[in-house]
Structures are given as structure tokens and as C-alpha cells.
Image: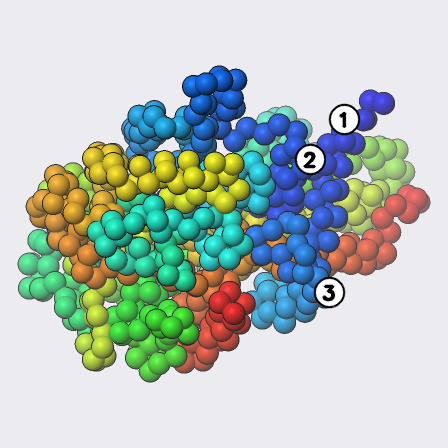
Amino acid sequence: MSGNVVNAPLDRRRLLTLGGGAVAAGLLAACGSNTGRTTSSSTSGSGGAKPALAQWYHQYGEAGTQQAVEGYAKAYTAATVTVTWKPGDYDQSTAASLLTGSGPDVFEYGNGPTIDMIKGQQVVDMTDAIGAAASDYNDAVLKRMTYDGKIWAIPQVIDMQLLVYRKSMLDKAGVTPPETIEDLRTAAAALTKDKVKGLFLGNDGGAGLMGGPMLWAAGLDFLKDDNTFGFDDDAAVTSLGTLRELFTSKHLLLGAPADWFDASALTQGLTAMQFTGLWTFPDIKKALGDDFGCIPWPKLGSASAGKKSVPVGAYGSCVSAKSKNVDAAKAFAKWLWVDQTDKQLDFATAYGFHIPSRKALLAKATTLQSGPAKDAAQYAVDFGHAQSPLLWTPKCQTAFGDMMSKIVKDGADPKAQIATVKAVAQAELKRVAG
Amino acid sequence: MFVGPFVLGLVVFIYVPIIWSAYLSFFSAYNTVTPTTFVGFGNYLDMVRDPAFRSSLGTFLVFAAFIVPTTFVLSLGTALLVSRTRVMQAFFRSVFFLPVACSYVVAALIWKMSIFSGVRFGLANTILGWLGRDPVPFLSLTHPPWYWLVIVTARLWLQIGFYMILFLAALQRISPTLYEAAAIDGARGWQVFRWITLPQLRPTSTAVILLLLINAFQAFDEFFNILSTFGTYPPYARPPLVYLYYTALGQGQDFGHGSAGAVILTLIIAIVAVVQGRLTGIGRAVD
């Protein structure tokens, strides 16, 4: 779930097609399927036919993106690349199509392939495609796409989340941008006025969004470096408990018409500070001019190992192991997402507001040379954390989300809740890594 | 001959997936629909032991126990009122039926973002404001569970019209002679309803209750679209299908556990339906 991909509305019928539908898709694959791949023109004799590749993207919201990626594909001469632009439930339909022979050759996937795709050998190792350029990619993002010492996807473009504030409101209240979580609470209280709340962390009070940042603030993480459970710790109890205190303080904005991924709450003056995505910067700038600044999520002052953080995510370009032209597909992915830096820069900055995944390109991005945007780009390098680790499976994520909701909304005991998640996560880790 | 294409469609898109799903539920099937590791009832045990799944089943038993009679009474009531009215009958019928034509997703978004949004200018909060109350963040709090108000009103608004039409059709099939005979015998108001209308409606009532039950357990659309936020769904008011979507059938691609969960849900619906059929006598000849 990187970036500005708002959940596509989903209904029951489409859900039910996911399980059984994967089967139906397999059956239908035999009866002529349209993968978007042009049929390979193998008739030409001596010239040597170019391989035909199908490349899949999810539907980006920004105008011009589709034309841009089609243009990139056309510019590639070593293969005939056909771009398929897939609206709707991209992750699910792509994952299902990988089970069949009718999937894409090259496809993007949020934060790289899932651990089950890697374990299921549905995607191929991309380490040699990235090669020496690896050190130039954002560390947090590349680490997220690495398993067993191998890189499984090439990061395309980075999205990030951070804390944005109205300068004028802070000045008026005599508040400086907070350095610690404790400062943040004081600031939220000071900034809460008649019709303005101090802080907005999403309509669920940050239960869905702030779990990771609160762990990082305490110097912890979902998993330790050796892939064991990472937050069975008193600092996590304190940190997550703080979120509950904020929730009951009446200084948090709750129930805004547009949730945290939209800047309306900030621009309409419903809140003075908001945790949101970098993608809202053009909207904020349009509405507020220079009256805004941004900071990373603060650290927990009481935790000595606490660190500031920003969640970063990136779609990664992967190659399906079921592709009939794995080498050609890898060559294309390398060409576009490693070699063609001008296209990467264009993709990151010309349509939506993103950060190039390669550090060397930051200095070349005209959109990131001044003001809050420049700060944000640097935060992604200095404080970036992948939203959740590769081994943190959907099942762990659901248990974690349940824990967050129960702590923040119901005031459940963080220690007991962490123990519940630990049990689920350890079983999953055993299954996945074992 | 004529049903051939339909039967083929049914087989390919309904029966094969159902049977395959039952087959998958006995295997460890991560990211594959052609699994090789047989686990027997392991997936079922895991699902039954999973407290989150149990709690979602429990929640929806309670939900069904509430929503089925409520929708039944309200749609029957509306049907009675509309069938009695002498003026603008077509208008009232259409007005109550109209919400049925509305998408669950669209209705859910309207309920969430305009009517029950938590800020002072949401419709419900504007009304509370007139009464001098503070705005309520309906979907953010769990104490008290205001979110049920949002979900239940959305569901009632969407569903009542459809069942009203079923009842209207049934009401019009009741022979007027029965009412005339009852009137001659001196039956009035409630007596007529209890001893003439209700018994005559029994085949329709049974069908309506069955449909409502299935609908309640299959809840997904409005719950998902009202309560989910960006990749997460809170642990309360979580329909079993939504839970399966998040843990197994969506990004997880854990078809073994997902199918086991779906089979359990199907069995519950089947058992409740059979029990209800026994109690109310579906298929029994009308006396």
C-alpha cells in the first residue's frame, strides 16, 4: 500500500471471485486469454523476431502517467513491450494472475513481491539486473525488497508520509515544531482551539497509520534484524499507550470528511498538524502557499534508543518466473528502472509528487529543490523506514491492526495486546522463514 | 437445450469454484490453487481456534439476530402502509423501492462521508448542533459503538424497499373474499392481520427471512466501505468475509485457510437455514 493508492471500493461479489476466481482464471487460461501481450511475430525468418513482453501497472491517479509509461515502453527497441493499465484491485488480480500462465512478464508490486511470491518462486531474482547501482537506491526501500541476500524488485519511485503543520498556527500559539512525542502532545494541546484540533492522525486516531512510527519512535521495529519479533518491550507499551492518551485527550481530530491521505483537514483549517503523504504537497501549496512546514515523526523522549522516522514505500518492478522470456523481461526492467535515469526522473516528478528512488537523482529533481519538499526528500534518506518488513505477512498485519485498534480506541492493555500479536507473528514467521 | 449455456456458465463459474474451494480447504495452499500438501482438517482447526475469526462469527450471529427481524418488520410495515394508501400509490411504491437501485458502495460512501462524518458540518452533527450537542465522531469511537447506527441505517435504507416489493406482491394475491368473510365475522384491525394477512403471507415471509439471513452472514460491501481505512479494518463489526479477505483471500493468497473459513461460513448459513425451515415450514403446503 504505497503512496496515493486509495483503496478501491470493493464489494462482496468481487471478493468471492478472488478465491474461486483464481481457479476460474486458471481454467479459462486455456481458452485464449488476453494478457496484453502482442502475439510474438515469429514468422520473420532471418531477422530474428523480437520477444513480446507484457508489462502491468496499477492505475495511477495522476493525468499523463499512463501515456508516459506507454512512451517508455515504445522507446525500448530490444523487445515489443505492451503496457497494460489495470484499474481496480491491482494487487489481488495481479497476485491471482501469477498463479496462472496468463500473467504479465514485467509488473510492479507495492513494496516489491510478497514473501509468499518469493517463496513460491513466482518471481525471479533481480540482483544482477540492479548490479552496482544498488548502493544508489534508497536504503530502506531496497532493504524491503531484499530477502536472503537477493534483491527481488527494482524500486520505481518513492512515496512517503510525514508530519505537516501550519506555520502560522504554530507561531500564533507560540509552539515550535516538536522534537519528541512528549513535545508533540503538549503542542497538540496548545494548538487545540474552539474549532481547530491540534493534530490529525487519521479518523481512527492513528490506530491504522501510526503503529510503525510509534514503534520506531521507541527505538523498536516490527521485527529485529534477525527476523524475530521486535516489540515485546516496555518502551513499546509506553509508546503505544501514548497514542491512547492522545486519542482521549480531545486534541485529536476525529471523523474528518476526508481521511489522512487527503490534505483537506489541514487546508480547511480543521487541524494545525496532520500526518499525511508527500503526495498532498501540491494541494497544500495551492491552498496555503508557504504557510506550511514538515518534520519527521518525533522520537519518544523517554526511550534512549528512540529515533525520528518517516514511512517510505515504493512500487517495485518485478519479473514473473512464469514469463516465457525471463531474460528479455529482466533486460527490459533493468533498462527502464536502472539505466534510464531521465525516464525515472520524469516518472517521479512530472506527474504526481514523488521522490526518485535513486539518491543521485534527488539533486536533479526540480520539484525537490526548496522549502518543505526539499526537507521531505532528505527525511526519506535519513529517517526512512519501510512501512512494514517483508516477513510481516498480511496475517501479522491484521493482528497488528487489531491490536492498535483495541489499544487506541478501547483502551486495552498494550502489554497483553502485544503478547497476542507476538503469538500470531511467531507462528507466521515459523511458517515463512522456517 | 435452451438452458445449456446457463448450465455451462453455472458449472464453470459457480460449481467448479465451490468444489475446488472445498478441495483447497484440506490443503496448505499458499499462492497456489494446485496444492500438494494435504493437511486434513488442519486449516479448519486453525480457523476455529483463531479468536479473531470466532469473534467475527459471533458478532454476525448477533447482527443477524437483530437485522433480520428489524428488516422484516419494517419492510412488512411499509408494504402494508403502501398497499392501503389510496393516493399516489405508484409514487410511494417507487420512492421506497428507489434505494434498491443504489449501489451499496455509493451508499456506504455517502453515509460515511456526508451524513455521519465526524466534523461539525456533517449532516447528523449539524442536527446535533441545532440541539446544542457537541459533534460526535461516529466512526471513530468504539464506546459507545455509534458505528452500528451508521451501518444499520445504511443497510435498512438499502434493503427495505426490495423486501417491501416482495410483500406487496404477496399482499395483492390475498383474495379479498377472505377479508370480506372476516369482516362479516366481526374481525377488526389486529385480528384481521393476525389471522388472515400473516398466515396468507407465510410462503413469502419464509423466503424473505431466508434471504435476509443469507444476506446478513454474507455482509461485506457496506461494512468494508464504511469502516475500512487504507489497508486496515478495525477488529469490531468485522464480517467473516472481510476477515477472510484481509488474512487469506486478498494479498495473503492463503487459499487453504481462506477456503476453510468460507466453508465454515457456508455450513453455518446452511444449518441456520435448515433450522429456520423446520421452524417456519418452508416448502410445506399452504393451508
Provide residue A110's location: percent of width, then percent of height: 39, 48
Q: Earlier in the sequence, mark 2 or mark 3?
A: 3
**What residue appears at the point 62 percent right and 38 percent down from the top-left corner?**
A25
**What residue appears at the point 81 percent right and 26 percent down from the top-left corner?**
B3
Q: Which mark is residue B165?
A: 2
Which amino acid is tagged 1?
Answer: Pro
| Of labels 2 and 3, the one closer to you | 3
Callout 3: 10 Å neighbours few (<14), some, many (20+)? few
**What residue appears at the point 30 percent right and 40 percent down from the top-left corner?**
A337
Q: Report which residue position mark 3 lands on.
A: B40
User: Mark 2 near mark 3, Cβ–Cβ under 8 Å?
Assistant: no
**What residue appears at the point 70 percent right and 44 percent down from the top-left corner?**
B17
Could you tell me if residue B55 is visible in this image?
A: no
Which amino acid is tagged 3?
Answer: Gly
Q: Could you say which is closer to the camera, residue A261 or residue A250?
A: A261
Disc 2 is attached to a residue of which chain? B
Q: Report which residue position mark 1 lands on.
A: B5
Tag 1, which secondary structure?
A: helix
Tag 2, which secondary structure?
A: helix
Which amino acid is tagged 2?
Answer: Ile
Provide residue B150's location: percent of width, then percent of height: 48, 52
Callout 1: 10 Å neighbours few (<14), some, many (20+)? few
- In the drawing, does residue A430 fall left or right of residue A286? right
